[in-house]
Amino acid sequence: MGRDQRRARQYGNHAMKLSAETFPYERAPSNAKDIFWTTDYATIYWTNPPDWAWQSVRSSVRTEDGVIWRESTMAGECRICVCLDPHFAFSVSVAPDVPSATVPSSVHDWIYGHADKLSVAWCCSIKSVLRLADHWFLALMRTTRFPFKRTYFLGVSLFGYAFNRLGAWWRR
């Protein structure tokens, strides 16, 4: 079994409805919450995710700026989907002008921003929700061929939970 076949088995076939070039976003106004925001509805799919990720998304969850759900297609594929509403604000931390980082960052930021609500709806820990976000982030970066995908994944995996919990404590 070759490297690509092992990767396909481990991470699934990560198809996005949107490419980095067609993702509807723009630089947000200076008074916005973050650097970028979506300009239209954007639906991103994770096709045939790992079993643990598929089982994590136990129900669809709607928030004020998006929705996440899972579905099975007629072709027998399993998909986890997120639809971001227009004006969802997100940042692309270290590489803001690299188009291949925008789609992964938007999904990652949305899941991180709603980790508390998602963990309650799915009856799991916040750490499990953030793990889903981190691995989907890596899958999307592979799809968009982001050159520093492993470095970014390592960063969000190591520091994401701590920053998320610090942010939740700060917002109290």
Image (tube, rainbow, N blue to C red):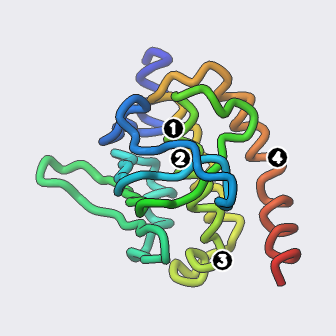
Q: Is label 2 in contact with label 3 (beta carbons under 8 Å)?
A: no
Choose top left, top right, bottom left or bottom right for residue 13.
top left
Q: Is residue 75 left or right of residue 125?
A: left
Considering only vertical position in the picture, is 100 above or below 16?
Answer: above
Is label 2 in a helix, a strand or a loop? helix
Quadrant of the image for the C terminus?
bottom right
| Label 4: how many Cα within 10 Å (few below 14, some 14–19, many 20+) | few
Q: Position of residue 18 (x, y in %)?
A: 34, 39
- Identify which residue is drawn at 77% across, 53% down: 160
Q: CA distance from mark 4 to mark 3?
A: 19 Å
Reading the image, the residue beneath label 3 is 116
**Mark positioned earlier in the residue sequence (4 or 2):** 2
Instruction: Check disc 4 and give the amino acid type.
Output: Leu
**In the rendered image, which quarter is residue 67 located in?**
bottom left
**Which of 7/30 is in front?**
30
Percent x, y for residue 6? 47, 26
Q: Earlier in the sequence, mark 4 or mark 3?
A: 3
Asked whether the beta carbons under mark 2 and mark 1 sit within 8 Å of each other, the answer is yes
Front position among marks 4 and 3: 3
Q: Which residue is mark 4?
A: 158
Q: CA distance from mark 1 to mark 3?
A: 23 Å
Which residue bears the numbered disc 1?
139
Q: Secondary structure at mark 4?
A: helix
User: Which amino acid, mark 1?
Assistant: Ala
